[in-house]
Amino acid sequence: MRFKLTFLLTLLISLNSIGQGDLAPKYSNEFLSIGVGAAALGQSNSVVAGVNDVTAGYWNPAGLTGVTDFMQIGAMHAEYFAGIANYDYIGIAKPIDDMSTAGFSFIRLGVDDIPNTTQLIDPGTGAIDYDNITLFSVGDYAFLFSYARKTPIEGLSVGGNFKVIYRHVGDFARSWGFGLDAAAQYQLNDKWRFGAVVRDVTSTFNAWSYSLDDQIIETFEQTGNEIPQNGLELTLPKIILGSQFKTNIVKEFYVATELNVDLNTDGRRNVLIRTDPISIDPHMGLELGYGKWVALRAGIGNFTFVKNPDLTESLTFQPNVGIGVGFKGINIDYAFTDIGDASVALYSHIFSLRFKLTDPRTKDEGVPSLNE
């Protein structure tokens, strides 16, 4: 309850800042940076170069050309802050022909049953009336329409996303946004892959509108906040570069390592390389697997600086681990994340599912690979 009340106050003040202030606030539409699929989360989101399944619609749409099945479907549900925030994803990918693939991804991050206490005090009598408490939800929704195509250059695929974003805070505020992502993926040989994604390549615009009753307006005035006005929120481009090295060790045992670098263009962030206007945030992942059946994963990322009591700074990071198994067209992945700060001890167990559908007109006799 206390968290939700604090969340509400923080959110309303943040929306007020968007309505009145910076057109391009830092961390705009940041729910789209959480990630999808436990396979990627277990590697600290370091998959831009190597991803080639249905989740590529989110990570790197050019990687959708690696989908060779009749259709792939992916799903994930995660809970954060002891179940207060719910994160859901579902994706679909289907080849159009031998050269191109289409995909669709749906993402929702929401907090439900938040108490609205703005009318807790009766304006006529001044008495506290708990019957005036109502509940509302906050939700961020993204709809990603993906397309990928192989180019005449051997090993090179390109792709992109058209995304529609809907965000709401109960009946108080809502916005619609539209944006584009551009991506490429290049397989140099059997061992090396490279990837590049420019998210919000044209910048993404969210048009916010507010519907505040007199009670909320009075609360804002009494607390010294300006009344939010309808306006635009701009999400600036983010560039992600990646390289993957994958090789067999002995027989069917293999190892794959990937390094990604995020280039944020929205100003100085608390990341490993803090510069303005571009901050550089590296992260890396490792996967050890046996043939088509099992993969162990680990990653390191989320490098941040923490202020110490003596005003010095210490560099912290977040390690992730995970495992995946595959059998007869079904892949189940698990990731253990949010283990970078032992003082907070907020752990998240993430499960995701991927499965492949065969053409009903044919019979698929093969056993799918975990890494196909």
Image (cartoon, helix red, strand yellow):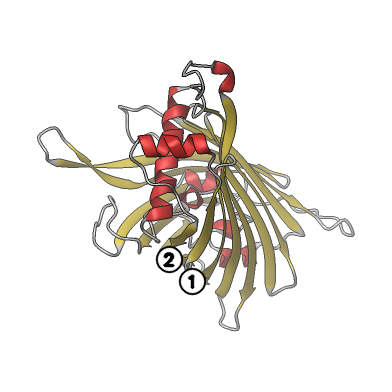
The residue tagged 2 is 237
Q: Residue 188: image x %, image y %?
A: 48, 73
Q: Earlier in the sequence, mark 1 or mark 2?
A: 1
Q: Quadrant of residue 159?
A: bottom right
Q: Is disc 2 surrounded by few (<14), some (14 to 19) or many (20+) residues within 10 Å? A: many
Residue 193 seen in this snapshot? no
Give residue 202's mark: 1
Q: Residue 340: image x %, image y %?
A: 34, 36
Residue farthest toward the right in the current orientation of the protein: 361
Relative horizontal placement of residue 127, taking residue 152 as reference (left or right): left
Relative horizontal placement of residue 90, taking residue 182 as reference (left or right): right
Residue in view at x 44 percent, y 33 percent? 7
In this rendering, the answer to whether 37 lies above or below 200 is above
In this rendering, the answer to whether 43 lies above or below 97 is above
Distance from the alpha carbon under mark 1 to that under mark 2: 7 Å
Residue in view at x 60 percent, y 84 percent? 152
- Circles 1, 2 touching at the beta carbon (< 8 Å): yes
In this rendering, the answer to whether 133 lies above or below 157 is above
